[in-house]
Amino acid sequence: MHMKCRWVLALAAAAAILAGESCSSSHVPANSSLMWIATQDDRQVRTYTISLEKGSVLAVGNSNGNPAATGVQPVEMALTPDGRTMFIVNSGGNGTAGSITAYTLNADGSLKAAGSGVAAGETPISLAVDPGGKFLFVANQGTSGDVTSGTVSVFSISGTSLTEVAGSPFPTEVPGDVSGTGPSAVAASPAGNFVYVANAFNSTVESFSFDSSGALTLIARYSAGTNPSGLAFSRCAGVTSSTATAACPGADGNDLFVSNSGSNNVTIFSACIQASGTCSAPDGTLAEIPSGSPVASGVGPAGILIDPTNDFVYVVNRGSDQVSQYQYSPVTGVLTFLDNASGGASVFSGGITANISNQTNTFNWVVVTNNGASNVSIFHVALSGRLAPLASGAFPLKGQPSAILLR
């Protein structure tokens, strides 16, 4: 990769996205993260950069962020591990089926749509890519009245091409269920071959294994809080000696955080995804941590943001338009509440940048989409983990921002 610009270590992932391209053609400022934002009313995804030092935002490609078309109601994004392909899940609506749209990245980080999208199950709402970049998992929420509608679609990935694997979509309902489960979030384990699904309609989390073909096998079902709607693994979950970094020299508690939108709290599970003192044989099972779970959040918690270099966790609360802030203990798994930050109007989702730092300050940012205000709120992450709003205020956008991804 012939790149001679001075990229900071925290932006290695962004550099990987631009692999093979010269810095002179990328136009990504030094010490910046790429930021993609999808808007629901005009069905577009736009590309920006955000300065890690100042929090300022610049459009990429042209003054409008070089928009690319999405499907109906884009709600979540995921990048493949090599940083070359993005997928967006579009939940559909008004008689339009949901879909998965695929994109390649241009030299400047903006997106180029690849095809018109592929169908998933009923009301696809969340997606995840396995660490090997082989499979895309899609949670299809379905309806509570249909006991067969809650499923997980699995696709094999080849560039921007998706091929549904044999047996997909896989059911999340089990014999004896009297209603749909309502899969609302999906997460692939950072180590091992496990997938976790949060079910909003029956307030459970399910663990699955997947084989070399991508086929899912249910391992177990666990009680969570009421209406779980978000999943995220702890910062150093799954780290091994071969994947260790300065920020993550070893694995933490391999903890899985579950936001419960109906009970306004976060459940914390320890996941048996790699051998440890509490996990002799990785089998994908979950165990709620013995104390400190659940922990209170704001109203209607949804997305969970994990600081990539520090032990902070942020939860986006759609009901109270806030971001709850926590200190994470990698030893106990406990989240200690720090503060709530006020978002904007109809907060929908959020993202967090990479981090650069010196001895007196940190330079990373939390960005929250305000679906009802056509803007995003930007917060600086202080050394304490608390969030401070950008002094210049919210950044205006066209449309109703929903999905966001920063890298």
Image (cartoon, rainbow, N blue to C red):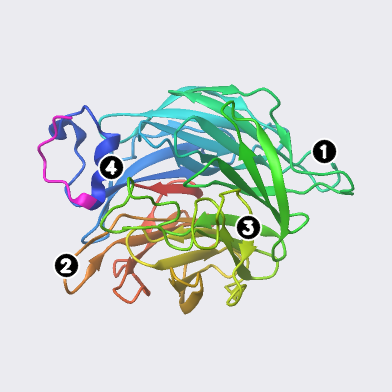
- Label 3: few (<14), some (14–19) or many (≥20) C-alpha neighbours in 10 Å: many
Residue placed under numbered mark 2 in the picture: 358
- Distance CA(mark 4)–CA(mark 1): 40 Å
Residue 95: x %, y % from top left: 73, 33
- Residue 2 magenta-drawn? yes
Q: Earlier in the sequence, mark 2 or mark 1?
A: 1
Q: Earlier in the sequence, mark 1 or mark 3?
A: 1
Residue placed under numbered mark 4 in the picture: 14
- Distance CA(mark 4)–CA(mark 2): 21 Å
Q: Is residue 302 visible?
A: no
- Label 4: few (<14), some (14–19) or many (≥20) C-alpha neighbours in 10 Å: many
Label 1 near label 4: C-beta < 8 Å? no
Tell me: residue 30, above or below residue 56. above
Q: Taking 261 as reference, is 279 left or right?
A: left
Image quarter where the N terminus lies is top left
Please tell me whether mark 4 or mark 3 is closer to you in this view: 3
Instruction: State the extent of the magenta-drawn residues as a range.
Output: 1-9
Residue pictured at 25% horizontal, 45% vertical:
12
Residue pictured at 13% horizontal, 30% vertical:
2
- Distance CA(mark 4)–CA(mark 3): 32 Å
Mark 1: which secondary structure? loop
Residue 163 location, quadrant: top right
Q: Nearer the viewer, residue 274 or 161?
A: 274
Q: Earlier in the sequence, mark 4 or mark 2?
A: 4
Residue placed under numbered mark 3 in the picture: 286
Q: Nearer the viewer, residue 85 or 192?
A: 192
Residue 139: x %, y % from top left: 64, 41
- Distance CA(mark 1)–CA(mark 3): 25 Å
- Distance CA(mark 2)–CA(mark 1): 53 Å
Q: Amino acid at mark 4?
A: Ala
Q: Earlier in the sequence, mark 4 or mark 3?
A: 4
Label 3 near label 4: C-beta < 8 Å? no
